[in-house]
Image (tube, rainbow, N blue to C red):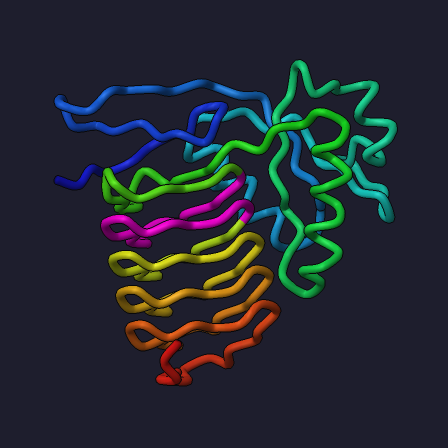
Amino acid sequence: MFAWLGWANRLGGVIAKEDDFEVTSSFMRLLLYGSRSFSRTVHELALDCGHEVAGSIDDFYVGPTILGTLESVATSHPPQEFGLVMAVGYSDLRGRWGAWTKAKSLGYEAPSLIHPRAYVARSAVLQPGTMVMAGAIVDVRAVVGELSVLWPGVCVNHDVVIGSNCFVAPNATICGNASVGRSSFVGAGAAVADHCAIPENSFIKMLTRNFVKS
């Protein structure tokens, strides 16, 4: 059985709206690490998931919604009181992961954000910090790694493994038993055939088809 999913709890679990599923929710006050274009999308996703956004962290820019650098915000908005969402985009995936490693070392936790209109199988595993946007599908026994982002319309089929820190763009399809290595980007409308293994740090262009088997 599947369930439509709502908010994520503090450890990355999700609300299931079906009566026969355990409901585990936790409102969080969130900080967005990043303040550029992707952060605006993440901000709306967090609100749709029922959380409150306190402001943004940015180590390079200042602005009306920016609370300060990570070091200063760790004092003014400590990890005991705020969760953190990585709102840094895919242009520098290595830098994104490095920023998260630093934030985690200070004690911050990243909830998973699953849009209420996303569709996730009960047996799927979403690791902390994942983002699943409206209309995305995560099928049975699939695993989505830490901090990975599934854009609207993505289909992650059965037994797929998405590594940590990946971006899968709108309407991309990852077919059954395929894998995508960590810190990879899969372009809009791209397809990865069943049992294919995409290496780490890959960049898959939009609308391409990938058939090389593992």
In this rendering, position of residue 49 left or right of residue 92? left
What span is in magenta? 129-147
Residue at x-position 49% and y-position 53%: 149
Residue 119 magenta: no
Q: Is residue 33 above or below residue 18?
A: below
In this rendering, position of residue 15 left or right of residue 207? left
Q: Give x and y (percent) for residue 33.
A: 70, 40
Q: Is residue 207 above or below residue 118?
A: below
Q: Give x and y (percent) for residue 13.
A: 39, 29
Query: Which is more toward the observer, 17 or 122?
Result: 122
In the picture, which quadrant includes the N terminus?
top left
Query: Which is more toward the observer, 41 or 201?
Result: 201
In the picture, which quadrant includes the C terminus?
bottom left
Please name the predominant secondary structure of the magenta segment in the image.
Answer: loop
Residue at x-position 53% and y-position 21%: 28
Residue situated furthest top in the rendering: 80
Residue at x-position 61% and y-position 28%: 109
Residue 138 magenta: yes
Residue situated furthest front in the rendering: 214
Task: Give the quarter of the image for residue 211.
Answer: bottom left
